[in-house]
Image (cartoon, grey):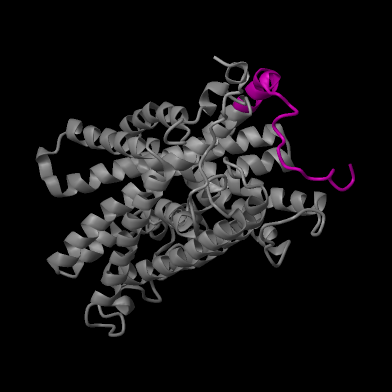
Amino acid sequence: MSSTTVNEAPQKVSLSRVLGPGHVWALGVGIVLVGEYTGWNFAADKGGTLAAMIICWVIGLLYTSVAMIDSEVTSTVAAAGGQYAQAKHIVGPLMAFNVALYLVFAYTMLEVSNAILVADTIKSYAGEDFTYWYHSGIEAAVIVVLAALNYRGVLMTLNVNFVITAIAFIAIIILFFSVQPWSQGAILKLGDMVTPENALPYGWLGVIAGFHWGIWYYLGIEGTTQAAEEVRSPARSLPYGTMAGMITLLVGASITWYVCASLMPWQYLGSTVYPLLDAGRLTENKTLEYMMFIATVLSALASANGCINDAARAWFSLGRDRYLPSWFSAVHPKYRTPYRSIIFLVPIAIAFAFISDINQAITFSILSGVLHYTFMAINIMMFRKKWPLGSIRRGYTHPFHPLPAIVLFILCVVTYFAIFLGYGAQLTAMVVFYIIMSLWFHFYRYQYVKRGDQFTMPWPKPQGY
């Protein structure tokens, strides 16, 4: 054997840059679209049907701000981990560690919610013969099968997500035109369902209380940033894919509200787990009913699939920077995926699916998401202050700064209050959990971090340093 061969350094295996704007759209919309099939409607229980519409657009403004901020910072810090990588370079290691935890728990609990939803939806048709073991078996199967798909490669994963997300979205469009929206009174009866007497049954406090569930309209669109290291052109793919995703979701959410609010009284709309499936049933058209049943399952599968992708990338990034054991940073030599991180999170998701109900899982995901959005408002302000326009190359520059950051922060504060009204104990418990994890990282884990290796962007020193 030659000395050249003996001394040759092993080639480092990295993630593959194989994704385009369509895959970014499939990742973002795929994670979120399930929120139009279930979850958003619980806002009607808090404030009435009109409140659910107001919340749809106000929370849409929150997420438009999220998308704008993400598009700028992630196209500049194009690394796996998304907002974690941003926090690491802009704020500091402790914030980065917390942001990564927010991401992992938000996506993992959203994945759990989706697995429960698939099992619950099938159970609603299977009847009394559907035992606990059948239900648990479907939850486990959803998580394991989708994890195996993610294991085999990100291109395959997001190609599948593109197809099933498109089918689920087209189903909403077909339902919309099938109920003759241009002819109120034929099938839709919005005037009978939303009257001056019941429009806002609990006043404006009910609108604020509904912010909690309004997050479900769009929760997860920020997951597009997790693909930053695997897109061919971050400066093009991330802004286009993310903003196209937000437009898709705003259209879908508005259509969903209009159809459901025109078919169901607010008391029922606020309690059902399957608003779009029930809308299909209420048309008394079996074809539409079965279409919405299939689309509900597909939307949950697309969301769970994207969540596994995103949670694994955040966990992988923590391992790569030694914030967690570097064992998690392994990339599969053939499939080029963070396979150990994918496998590690599977039993955690299954355990939560077995012990949680869907409301608990959704709330856990929402709380982690809102903590993360609060960071984003602070992050973009620090980013623009430390590296003003012109000081570094940006892939995309979002307009209207600092207005999106201010709007985002204010709406996050309102959402905290809304969550406190309904889930104060859970909010307190989660904050305590994140404080404990911060102390663990600061006093124990950070000693293993190679401090000079964690910062990878070739930027000049920040302004004022």
Outermost residue on the front side: it is 2
Report the magenta residues as a range: 437-465
Q: Which residue: 70% across, 48% down?
A: 379
Main SS, magenta region, reads loop
Give coordinates of residue 226: x percent, y percent. 53, 45
Outermost residue on the bottom side: it is 183
In this orientation, which residue lies closer to the viewer: 347 or 417? 347
In this orientation, which residue lies closer to the viewer: 264 or 236? 236
Q: Which residue: 44% across, 61% down?
A: 47
Quarter occupied by residue 401? bottom right
Give coordinates of residue 27: x percent, y percent. 44, 52
Q: Which residue: 72% across, 40% down?
A: 89
Give coordinates of residue 429: x percent, y percent. 53, 32
Q: Is residue 188 visible?
A: no
Give coordinates of residue 457: x percent, y percent. 72, 42
Quarter occupied by residue 251? bottom left
| Quarter of the rendering occupied by the C terminus | top right
Q: Is residue 97 visible?
A: yes
In this orientation, which residue lies closer to the viewer: 180 or 359? 180
Outermost residue on the left side: it is 129
Asked if the stretch drawn in magenta spans residue 459, the answer is yes
The image shows residue 323, relative to residue 116, as above or below, that is above
| Quarter of the rendering occupied by the N terminus | top right
